[in-house]
Amino acid sequence: MPEITSDWQRAQLPRDKILDAPAARQTALSGLDLSQLTIRHGQFDSVDFHDCVFATATVLDTHFKTCTFHGCDFTDASLTRCTFAAEGRESVRFRNTDFQRASVKDSRLPRAAFERCSLYGAAFEGCDLSGSSFAGSTFSKSYSRKVVMTEIAFRRCRLRNVDLQRAHLEGADFTGTSLVGADLSEANLASAVLRDADLAGVRWVSADLGDADVRGAEIAGLDLLVLKAFARLRIAPAQQSALLSELGVTISPEEDA
């Protein structure tokens, strides 16, 4: 397994090179130009990346543990099946980045910008993505003209005030996630799992919650009348009162006192 050291220079990294199983631990890597490289089965543990260029790089099956990224460029990079654990940086920006089948755990990425990214099959768990945006990003993959699959998971995450307007999130898993103040206007959440999620203050205008599961979720403020669809929406008995109150219905005893 080749060892990466902090004294690498840009000139020492030839274009179109394949790096098999590179490793770095408890170091800082600054100013590396990794663009157009292919990195496979890498292991990075407690590495600080400063002003590194990952643009157009193909990074496959690589693990980043407790790493931070400062001023790094991920434009047009592929991070397929990569794992990120307990790392992050505020206000990170990804453009046209491929996160297919990537796994991100216990990471802080508040106010991250995912612009035109592919997130099909990605799984975020225990992450803080508050205030992030996903403009032009997709959570689906087209296998043919008629077969389009959607797969994305945000479990036990903080997605407060995120912008997911018009997102296709059919079958998405938001179990235990806080979506307080999120904008889900016109989002397709058909068959999505929102169990035990905090949905207070979510903007739902024209969202599709058909076949979605919100059992155990905080649904105060959910007005069914503003939704595009809610047929077969699954709720728990204890949530009936909150939904009826939003519709202006008062639950009273059968006989007046």
Image (spheres, rainbow, N blue to C red):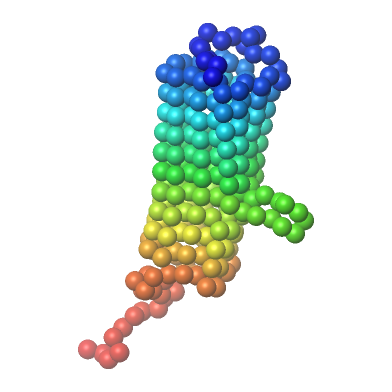
Confirm whether residue 131 shows in the render.
Answer: no
Looking at the image, which residue sits at the far front? 1
Side of 10 where 184 appears, left or right: left
Confirm whether residue 236 shows in the render.
Answer: yes
Q: Quadrant of the N terminus?
A: top right
Look at 61% across and 42% down and name the residue there: 100
Q: Check the image and report above or below for 79 versus 159.
A: above
Looking at the image, which residue sits at the far left? 257
Q: How many marks?
A: 0
In-front residue for pair 173/94? 173
Q: Check the image and report above or below for 27 versus 255.
A: above
Look at 39% across and 61% down and name the residue there: 217
Side of 182 where 16 appears, left or right: right
Percent across and percent down for residue 50 are: 51, 19
In-front residue for pair 238/220? 238
In-front residue for pair 224/95? 95
Q: Check the image and report above or below for 96 versus 121.
A: above
When asked about the image quadrant of residue 171, the answer is bottom right
Look at 65% across and 55% down and name the residue there: 149
Percent across and percent down for residue 163 are: 53, 47
Look at 42% across and 28% down and name the residue there: 66
Percent across and percent down for residue 189 are: 56, 60
When asked about the image quadrant of residue 145, the answer is bottom right
Q: Check the image and report above or below for 130 versus 149.
A: above
Looking at the image, which residue sits at the far right? 145
Q: Quadrant of the C terminus?
A: bottom left
